[in-house]
Image: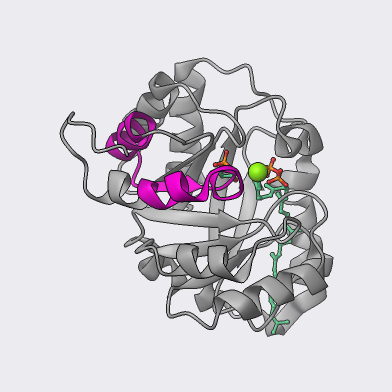
Amino acid sequence: MLEERMRRWRHVFKLDPNRPISDEALAAVAESGTDAVIIGGTDGITYENTRELWERVSRFPVPCVQEISSTDAVVPSCEGHLIPVVLNARETEWLGGAQHRAIKLFGDWIPWEQIAVLGYVVLNPDSKVARLTRSRTELQPADMTAYIRLAERLFRLPAAYVEYSGTYGEPAMVEAARRGKKDVQLFYGGGISTQEQAETMARLADTVVVGNLIYENLEQALQTVRWVKEPSGGKSTQT
Ligand SMILES: CC(C)=CCC/C(C)=C/CC/C(C)=C/CC/C(C)=C/CC/C(C)=C/CC/C(C)=C/CC/C(C)=C/COP(=O)(O)OP(=O)(O)O
Ligand SMILES: O=P(O)(O)OC[C@@H](O)CO
Ligand SMILES: [Mg+2]
């Protein structure tokens, strides 16, 4: 089951099908020691660019899953699919509307064992995902704790995702998320670029996601694997 395999992920890279990446960079990402590669993004995502990127990553043994942001771009051959639900979206479209249409469309073809739902709480108001979903990003720590309880206790989701896409987040908000959780797998993603940031979020979250840095500073992005998986206990190993 994808939910069980996903539990072992400590560090994950997120590759965007809408951004070019060379074969060398892709090989470095796939062979970095990361636990998985997620293929997904908010805009410009098509069946063609997702399928092409998935074919390139699937030549490597690293687990690779698609995070679905549009029904048109579902690639059935991917070995697993993550389904986002945006808990703080103002519009129900992103809280069940789009998912309902997709379930109706794909019907009996959906391989449920290979699907995992991620309950997103989107916090960077300037990110594409926040604008698209009109997320309520002005949250207090108590709101965050409640969202994580909503994800785990009411919706029984396997995972909740504190999403600061494009900017480094407030550790206090991730701490508040941690306070709300018992068993739900807590993801953190957003703006990680330094050892201190990676180690801070790795202490608070179960799984740390690194995206943009792959395209901005590949060498630094590759180091995040070690920073998350082998924390230095305060000593800088940044090169
Ligand atoms: C055999 C066969 C046919 C198999 C296929 C079956 C299958 C897997 C069916 C899918 C079933 C299903 C329920 C699909 C869900 C469809 C859907 C459209 C759901 C809505 C998802 C959603 C809430 C989208 C909103 C955007 C979002 C949350 C995207 C997630 C990724 C993300 C946050 C990216 C980061 O974005 P950002 O950094 O802001 O932007 P860029 O990286 O692009 O800059
Ligand atoms: O791209 P960054 O800012 O690293 O964020 C990673 C991921 O949480 C995006 O969905
Ligand atoms: Mg992004």
Q: Quadrant of the N terminus?
A: bottom left
Q: How many marks?
A: 0
In percent of the image, x 53 and y 36: which residue is there? 190
In the rendered image, residue 110 lying in the magenta stretch gets the answer no
* Residue 116 image position (x, y, % from top left): 52, 63
Q: Is residue 39 left or right of residue 107?
A: left
Residue 122 in percent (x, y) is at: 61, 33
What type of secondary structure mainly makes up the magenta span? Answer: helix
- The vertical placement of 33 against 163, above or below, is below
Residue 95 percent coordinates (x, y): 70, 45
> Which color mode does the image show?
one colour
Query: In what quadrant of the picture does the C terminus appear?
Result: top left
Q: Residue at x 72, y 59 (%)?
A: 20
88 sits to left or right of 218: right
Q: Is residue 202 within the magenta segment? A: yes
Dividing the image into four equal quarters, which quarter contains ligand 1?
bottom right
Residue located 59% across and 80% down the image:
111
Height in image: 154 above or below 74?
A: above
Nearer the observer, 222 or 129 = 222
Residue positioned 44% across, 56% down in the render: 12
| Stretch in magenta | 195-224
98 and 233: which one is in front?
Answer: 233
Name the foreground residue: 19 vs 169.
19
Work out whether residue 231 or residue 87 is closer to the camera in this orientation and state it: 231
The image shows residue 58, relative to residue 87, as above or below, that is below
Res 73 → quadrant:
bottom right
- Image quadrant where residue 74 sits: bottom right
- In the rendered image, residue 58, in percent from the top left (x then y), is placed at 55, 80
